[in-house]
Image (cartoon, rainbow, N blue to C red):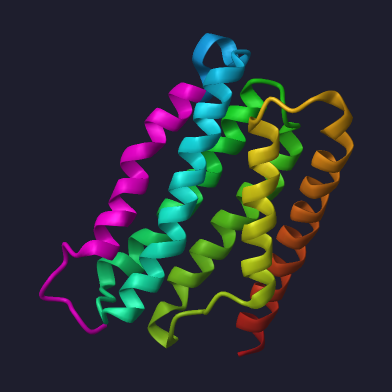
Amino acid sequence: MDDESKIINLPNALTLLRFIALPFCAYALFKNGGADATWRVLAWSGFFLVGLTDFFDGRVARARKQITSLGTLLDPIADKAAIGTALIGLSMLHRLPWWVTAVILVREIGVTILRFAVIREGVIPASKGGKLKTLFQGFGVGFFILPLPHWLFIPRDAFMAVAVILTVTTGVDYFVKVFKK
């Protein structure tokens, strides 16, 4: 880690901003029982901005050589908090089956615990499949948040199905790689 002396830097501030934004995202998702299209678009916008800060904090940290232990710890937790907030909220509103939420969260929490368990031997980098999984999860959840017309439900559901398949396969891949070592 290059810049431990400056724990509060732009990348870490962006990560903390993600945590701070999540209550607003949840509030907007649940506003008026989750049925208000305007609030659903606001919820989607909030989750989109949270995802965008996730994209930029890592890039900024590497470009500015501001990678810290705090950022390395908090970034994946913020990622899981964001996806977890959206998934649990959608399931509570009966928009997304609980089994989808359970599969994704069990994988995300399991891989996060695995990463922390082996961190002394080095960070497990995100694979291309893991990055693709994150992309499909983000868009899949976003499609469930947005007030889409019924004719888009089949593509929305197909997108989430791919996200679930990638979630399971990349999760198994992480565990296989660690246990082979």
**Image quarter (top left, top right, bottom left or bottom right) of the N terminus:** bottom left
159 is higher (above) or lower (below) than 110? above
Residue 99: x percent and y percent? Answer: 75, 38
Give the image quarter of residue 162.
bottom right
Give the image quarter of residue 154.
top right
Residue 113: x percent and y percent? Answer: 50, 63
162 is higher (above) or lower (below) than 90? below
**Image quarter (top left, top right, bottom left or bottom right) of the C terminus:** bottom right
Magenta: main secondary structure: helix
Q: Report if residue 34 lies within the magenta region.
A: no
| Nearer to me, 78 or 144 | 144
Which residue is outermost to the bottom? 181
Q: Report if residue 20 lies within the magenta region.
A: yes
Q: Residue at x 46, y 62 (%)?
A: 55
| Nearer to me, 35 or 102 | 35
Residue 9: x percent and y percent? Answer: 19, 65
The residue stretch that appears in magenta = 1-28
11 is higher (above) or lower (below) than 47? below
In the picture, measured across the screen, residue 154 lies left or right of residue 26, that is right
Q: Residue at x 74, y 41 (%)?
A: 100
46 is higher (above) or lower (below) than 94? below
